[in-house]
Amino acid sequence: MFSQYIETLPLGEWGPMLGEALDMFLFLGVELTALFLIISFIVGVIQEFLPAHKIQSILSSKSGKGYFSAALLGGVTPFCSCSTIPMLTGLLKAKAGFGPTLTFLFTSPLLNPIIIGLFWATFGLEVTVMYASIALLVSVGAGFFLEKMNFDRFIRPEVFGDKPVSSCATSCGDTKEEAPAATSCCDSAPEPKAESNSGCCDATEGVQVNADGTATIQVVQPNRWVRIWKDTWNQFLKVLPYLLIGIAIGAFTYGFMPADLIVKYAGPENPLAIPVAAVIGVPLYVRAEAVIPLSAALAAKGMGMGAVMALIIGSAGASLTEVILLKSMFKKQMIFAFLTVIFGMAILAGVLFNMFF
């Protein structure tokens, strides 16, 4: 779209790269906005109909079953690293086990059906099994370790909401009048009030005059679908600045970092090829649909298999956009731990692939 127009401008060799960067910014902006809204809405629906205690039971960290359930959930959800965030927020709000929740965060972009299918078609069954085994074991192990180290203390309080939702009277509206002991503010009051507490539980109040001359306050609850959508939209507005900044950086990197440069610094002649490839992979925002064909092309140009695997895990497992989004949910200690796990997994996979392939 933009590339065709920019090619007509006198920008020299910068024109095509700028066009690719702008095209990627538009593509990622539209795609991630749609994904974020859709997935957040789906998570809201799940939270509406699936009780929190059920999610807690399925993804409990009290047994190994919760970790592998989380890995399975991550494996069947075709999310990229960024679109995992709404589901992660929903799991945290539902008080699922912290370790299994992190396992989902690690496995979702690395073991989804798209990337596994492309892996199999491009590199064969043996490479695919080894890749999936490394990603699964490291993800489960990292989730277990970080929970045991009490890293859940680094979750930002705003993830759970500014106010604890203990009852209707305490979670809705900044009313200075205490609710009656026998009823909640969501129930119809026996007597009308001169002033109503509007906005309580997102409901609206009205006074109905009965035939006998008495008045009754009626509370109309909003449609649950409308309420879920409002929550989804409010959540999106909170992360929108982070999303735009991350997309801009990722698109710029995509447009101005040529593949030949990656081969030069992450080729087989470089002893630091594996860690360099892992580091390059994070800012190089590439979705699962593109990372495998790109990696196959780089391997054909001479990049070692270990560096290729490190690049795949670095780019699919984390991205600058995702890190910026996670920063709105976690404190810096957890962000550092997340990046350490992804880099460690990328380097481990790279070393093992260099040994066996």
Image (cartoon, rainbow, N blue to C red):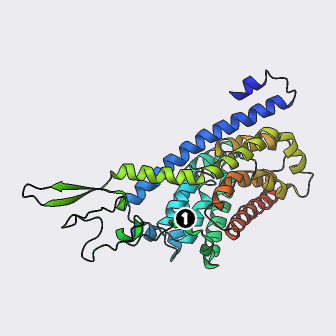
Which residue is located at x 19 percent, y 66 percent? 191
Q: Amino acid at mark 1?
A: Val
Q: Quadrant of residue 27?
A: top right
31, 101: nearer the viewer: 31
- Determine which residue is flagged by label 1: 159
User: How far across and how far down the image is residue 349, in percent?
Assistant: 75, 60
248, 50: nearer the viewer: 248
Quarter placement of the N terminus: top right
User: How far across and how far down the image is residue 255, in percent?
Assistant: 78, 38
Q: Is residue 7 above or below residue 131?
A: above
Q: Is residue 65 above or below residue 237?
A: below
52, 133: nearer the viewer: 52
User: How far across and how far down the image is residue 181, in percent?
Assistant: 27, 77
Q: Is residue 155 above or below residue 250?
A: below
Side of 278 where 152 appears, left or right = left
- Tally of marks: 1
Which residue is located at x 52 percent, y 54 percent? 235
Side of 98 where 53 appears, left or right = left
Quarter placement of the C terminus: bottom right
Q: Quadrant of residue 99?
A: bottom right
Q: Residue furthest top?
A: 8
**Residue 226 appears in the picture as rendered:** yes
Side of 145 where 89 appears, left or right = left
**Residue 77 appears in the picture as rendered:** no
Which residue is located at x 38 percent, y 49 percent? 226
User: How far across and how far down the image is residue 305, in percent?
Assistant: 80, 51
Q: Quadrant of residue 106?
A: bottom right
